[in-house]
Image (spheres, rainbow, N blue to C red):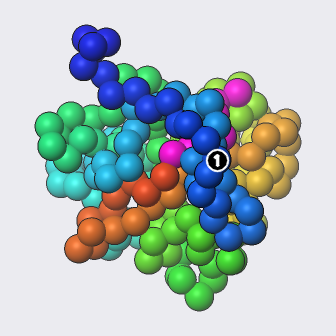
Amino acid sequence: MNPTRRHIIQIASAGAAGVCGIPVWAEGIVSEIQKGDQLMAAKGDNKQPLKVQDIPIGVKPVMAYAMDPATQKLRDATRMDKLLLLRFDEADLTPEAKSIAVSGVLAFSAICTHQGCEVTEWSKNDKSLLCFCHLSKFNPLQTGSVVKGPASKSLPWIGLASDNEVLVINSGFSAKPGA
Ligand code: FES
């Protein structure tokens, strides 16, 4: 990609804060993803911006990339910007999860904080996201906290909003994605 055309966000400061003191914009994170971006499935036949109802409740997460709505270009220059979308019944959301979700949909980095594999699976039994490489588990209802190591850092989340049911990015990553 031509670096002069890259819209790199240097997220400036943790000025705004969500509930429970969660930073909406964390300091020092470089990402192409911008507030207002739409989301596109990373695999499959759906070539439309993802809507709330495209994310099934309580099953395997949907892999996605952000997309610039003006140019329809995916923000996929780096795998660190790959996202996981999952949806819960809104009644099941914790206050922490509610603060970063829209209509029960939550978004996290898809890159494991242990050694950078993709977190692809959903463990129904303990409602956790699972990385198959070394079986780390993360709790999406506790903003990505580690349920089981070897990972020691939470899975970063990214805030969502919706525009006529179309999912849009509403914040930067809560922490640097990856290991
Ligand atoms: S890379 Fe995910 S558990 Fe090791």
| Residue that protrudes farthest toward the bottom in the picture | 91
User: As drawn, is 44 to the left or to the right of 135?
Assistant: left
Q: Is residue 115 visible?
A: yes
Choose top left, top right, bottom left or bottom right for residue 5: top left
Q: Quadrant of the C terminus?
A: top right
Read off the magenta span.
Answer: 172-179
**For the residue marked with disc 1, what is the amino acid?**
Ala
Q: Which quadrant would residue 139 be assigned to in this image? A: bottom right
Horizontal and vertical percent position of residue 1: 27, 14
Q: Horizontal and vertical percent for residue 16?
A: 59, 57
Rendered residue at 33%/33% (across/down): 75
Residue found at x 27% / y 35% = 74
Residue 136, percent from left and from top: 77, 43
The residue under label 1 is 14
> Along the line of sight, which residue is nearer the eye, 126 or 69?
69
Give the structural element (helix, strand or loop) at label 1.
Answer: loop
Q: Nearer the viewer, residue 44 or 157?
A: 157
Prevailing SS of the magenta stretch: loop
Q: Is residue 43 above or below residue 93?
A: above
